[in-house]
Image: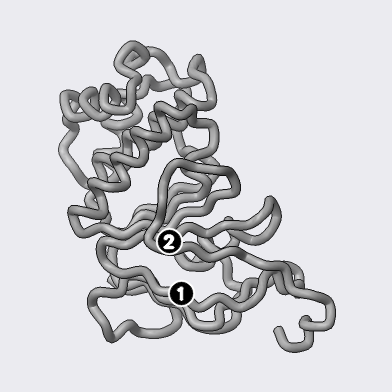
Amino acid sequence: MSLGNTALLDENITVETKNLLCFRDDRCLFAPISEEVRVGGSLEVKGRNGSGKTTLLRALIGLHRQTRGSFSISTSFLYQGHKLGLDESMTPVENLVWFQALNGRKANQSSAFRNIDFVGLAEKADTPCQFLSAGQKKKVSIARWLDSEKKLWLLDEPFTSLDTESSNVLVSIFDKHLVNGGSIVYSNHIDAVYTPSSEVRLEPVELEDLEEC
């Protein structure tokens, strides 16, 4: 699978950007970025709120079209935005089983429960998600990633709403995914406990630079 406006020649590169700019209403959101993510690697996209982190991730998967420069994705990917995509009338286990079906997999409640247990939600496994806290709902979404076979994870603010213990669990999930040949691109604006392979900070474009954009 490939996505973007250029082809990747190196099979070990899963994501690549070259002088990529994103616009909103003809406004350039950040200075050009040129980055690459390799198999087993991770990239943290940093920046203040409103700097364009979400827009960048959406651009990489084709959901934001106002771009200039080049970008490519060479492998299957999972995207998790700010909206968690949970059916809040369903329990965490039911949501994971539903996610399995959406990905063409046979429903497996045992696997769903193991993943819910792994993120520390076993006691809430049969509680409708509408009664869970923001952090608990975030854990349900993280548990779904464990059932995904996608090699590239594109995650918008994955550490938001997580306490220290839950953040450490997420770090272990990241490490396992990378060891198994995956890649991760994620945005972040808070101090987190994870150290990525590389990071890029989205810097605002000064008014005198707009002509160059």
Q: Secondary structure at mark 1?
A: strand
> Residue, x 18% and y 42% (percent of image)?
105
The residue closer to the viewer here, 159 or 131, is: 159
The residue closer to the viewer here, 24 or 207, is: 207
Residue 102 in the image: state x and y as whole percent. 30, 43
State left or right for residue 132 relative to residue 140: right
Q: Name the residue at the right extreme.
A: 207
Residue linked to disc 1: 35
Residue linked to disc 2: 43
Which disc number belongs to residue 96? none
> Residue, x 32% and y 46% (percent of image)?
174
The colour scheme used to paint the residues is: one colour
State left or right for residue 156 relative to residue 207: left
- Asked if 143 appears above or below 194 in the picture, the reply is above
State left or right for residue 210 relative to residue 152: right
The quarter of the rendered structure image containing the N terminus is: bottom left
* Quadrant of the rendered image containing residue 26: bottom right
Residues at discs 2 and 1 in contact (Cβ within 8 Å): yes
The quarter of the rendered structure image containing the C terminus is: bottom right
Which amino acid type corresponds to the residue marked 2 in the rendered image?
Leu
Residue 67 in the image: state x and y as whole percent. 60, 76
State left or right for residue 3 relative to residue 190: left
* Quadrant of the rendered image containing residue 33: bottom right
Q: Secondary structure at mark 2?
A: strand
Which amino acid type corresponds to the residue marked 1 in the rendered image?
Glu
> Residue, x 48% and y 62% (percent of image)?
199
> Residue, x 53% and y 65% (percent of image)?
200
* Quadrant of the rendered image containing residue 72: bottom left
Which of the two labelled residues, at mark 2 and mark 1, occupies the earlier sequence position?
A: 1
The residue closer to the viewer here, 152 or 112, is: 152
- Asked if 67 appears above or below 133 in the picture, the reply is below
Callout 1 crowding tier (Cα within 10 Å): few <14, some 14–19, many ≥20:
some
